[in-house]
Each structure stands twice: as structure tokens, then as C-alpha cells.
Amino acid sequence: MSDIAISKDSLGTVLPTTDCLGPHGVTYVRQVGAVASFGALDRLTRCTISDAPWPNSNATTSVVYSQDALLPSDIPSLRVVLHRDETGAARPAIHSFIDAATSTTLSCPLVNPSAALAKLDQVPSHLRLPFDSITTTQLVATGIRCKVYFGRYNHKLVVAVKTITLDHVHDDEIVDAFAEEIRLMASFHHPNVVALLGFAWDSVSLGSLMAVTEYLSQGNLSRFLTDNPALHWDLKASLALDVARALQYLHSLLQPKVIHRDLKPKNILLDWPSAKLSGFGVSREAMDDETLTAGVGSVFYMAPEALRSGYYSVSADMYSFGCVLCELDTQRPLYADIGVPAKRIMHLILEEGLVPAVTAAYPPAIRALAHQCFHPDASLRPTAFDVARDLDLFVHGDVGGGLV
């Protein structure tokens, strides 16, 4: 390596990657070209490598900077990996921290943000919100990969703000999937689908990426069914119709069609007296009869063929819809009355055709609709158009339910 320059004063315009944790829990912001910042991000250290050799046209090479070579001295030794950027130029990026005192290495894998940025570039520019215009307060929901907060836009409009959990902000697959979720939601315009108001990030790290949506204060359908026992089927069928119309929109009106892949009451939000579909974190577009890799979603709501073969289609969404109908009936979690381990339930679903139980109060028309959704031959299940038509007839007493 030649002409190694370290400066706290020069930080050029560079493509961002992600945050990572160094020794003692210190957060380092890694960027392509800008090696590290630390503490409260009030100090920046940049390493540039000029005229660096590229032996044998390998994709990467590396060099170790000792503690003495860095300013200030509280940065541990770093291993910096050179890689090619979009122009073919060699650029350094932080790879790992080397703690000489303990002889341990904390890995900070190189993340390429180009895929996520390419997806965000497809989102209309008016949906890119200033990062400092979004404030978050109360945590509303948390999952394995993301959290949802109550927030405000421009200190006025109440919004829901979805972010990546701290332990996943440096996972390029999760960041890329989140960017894809934002790209998909930006294309949705339907009264029964939660609306994306915009997205924001700090232009430094994609780990700061936020999806900003409308806030629905009534919460999700699962909680609503628990908190309000013995609901009348006139109301429950109306909520089911809203979900069917959302699926109808995703499966029939969008091109390419969108497969939700995680339909369940927790992903149905209430905007009284209506319901709106949310939870598009694992949703994907599909062309014509294309099937998608499974391994996603909540297992009790997944179609047997998706669990068994690893492929997902719009028909699998309809199986999940049948599960939602059953949960609307019992107002209890699926298979709550079966006192066996979850693995045994999965065996019964796959090998013996087990489907969710229902109550004696289940209206025959709704029972028949759910039974069709559970058909073992996925090609014989009703479409979202079919179920919207039948539910509209149940709710309103006349033929309806066309594409809406």
C-alpha cells in the first residue's frame, strides 16, 4: 500500500453502508471510502489509500492499521478491506476490529448497499421525507427484525414508523428486504391496504431507514378479537370482506401481482369500522403463474404445499385467508384447544389434513367458503375475487364484490 492518509477533516460524498459495533459496544459508522466514526458521531476518521495494488485481479485485499497509525489513539487496530466500487476504483471499507489486549477480532462484514439503494430509487421522489422531520416516541410493536413506533411527521401528523432492530441494521439481506417492502408499498393505493406516507434515512447509514405509514390507533385484528368476545358475524363478515378486497387488489389489479405470504390477524389493522391489510415485510411480486420460495410467514397460517415443497403462490394466500375466517369465528388463536406441541400440530396439518376448528355458530355460508380455501388441491381454491363476491353477498344480501 502506498500514500496512506488519515484525516478527521475530509469526508467526501460516498455511498453509505451500515453501522457496526466495535469493542466495548462503541458504534462505528462504516462507509465506502469513509472508514470509521465513533462515540456520539462527533468525530470522524477517514482512511484513503491511493494507488493501491490489486494483485491478480482479486475482488478484495487487506491491510492492518496499528493503533499508533490512527487518530485519535482510542480507536483499536482495524483491518480494512479494499473493494471495487461501481467505477472500478479501489476503495477501503472497515472489515473488523482487532483488540490487541485480548487478541480478539470483532467482525464487521462488508455490506453492499447498492441493491437496497436501487430499490429506494424506484420510489417516487415525493415519498422521500427529510430524516429530521420524523420523530418517534412510544414503541407500538416489535418483531424479530423490525420495530414499529408511534411517531409524528413535521411534529404534527400522527404516523407509524417502522425501523430495523439494532441487531439487524448491518444485515444486508434484511436491509434489502426492508427497502423492497418500501418499494412495494409505494405502489399500493387501496382503501383496505395500509398507506405508505413516505420513507426516510440519514444519508449516512441504511441502518437508519424508516418506513412511515398511516397510524391506525385501534390496533390489530388479533387483539380486537381477544378484547371483544362474542362479536356478531355481521361485523366479522364485514371485516373479512375488507381483507378479501385487499387481496383482490394485490392478486388481480396489480401488475405484476403481489403475494402477501404472511396473512394473519396480527397483520390486519383496524380503521373502524374498516380493516386494512399490513405486514408486507415478506410480500413479493410474481409474474403470471410464478411460484415463490417459501420459508416465510407464520407456520400455522401457511398452506401445506408451501410448507412441504417450499413454493408459494396466490392460492397459498387464500389458504391463509381461510385460517383468518376460522379465527374470526372462534376469536381464539388457531389450534388453541389442541394440547399437543406445535411440531405435532404441523405433522397433523401436513400428513392428516388438519384444519382449524370452528364453533357451532359459524354461518354455513362462511363455513363453506373456509372449507374451499382449505382445499388440498391449491388450484381448486377460490380466488380473492370469489371470496369477495360471496362475502359481499353475505354482508349486503345482493350480488356484488366486483373488482374494487
Image (cartoon, grey):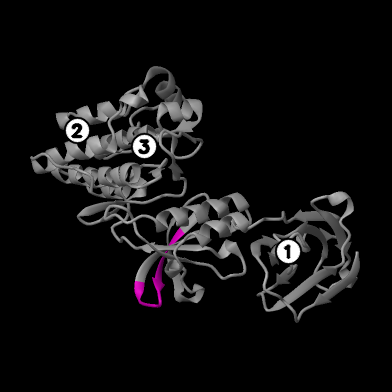
Question: Quadrant of the rendered structure where residue 136 is?
Answer: bottom left
Name the secondary structure under disc 3: helix
Nearer to us of marks 3 and 1 is: 3
Sequence order check, earlier mark of 3 and 1: 1
How many other residues sit within 10 Å of disc 2, few (<14), some (14-19) or many (≥20)? Answer: many
Q: Amino acid at mark 2?
A: Ile
Residue 182: x percent and y percent?
46, 57
Residue 288: x percent and y percent?
40, 36
Asked if 222 appears above or below 119 in the picture, the reply is above
Please name the residue that numbered disc 3 is placed on.
317
Toward the viewer: 113 or 211? 113
Distance from disc 3 to disc 1, alpha carbons, whole Å, reads 45 Å
Name the secondary structure under disc 1: helix
Q: Is residue 154 magenta?
A: yes
Q: Residue furthest front?
A: 87
Quarter holding the N terminus is bottom right
The circle on residue 366 is: 2
Toward the viewer: 52 or 393? 52
Q: Residue at x 32, y 53 (%)?
A: 193
Residue 324: x percent and y percent?
30, 38
Q: Which residues are magenta?
A: 148-157
Please name the residue that numbered disc 1 is placed on.
24
Q: Is residue 71 visible?
A: no
Q: Residue furthest bottom?
A: 9
Name the secondary structure under disc 2: helix
Asked if 138 appears above or below 165 in the picture, the reply is below
The circle on residue 143 is: none
Q: Amino acid at mark 1?
A: His
Drawn side of residue 194 relative to residue 340, left or right: left
Distance from disc 3 to disc 2, alpha carbons, whole Å, reads 17 Å
Nearer to us of marks 1 and 2 is: 2
Sequence order check, earlier mark of 3 and 2: 3
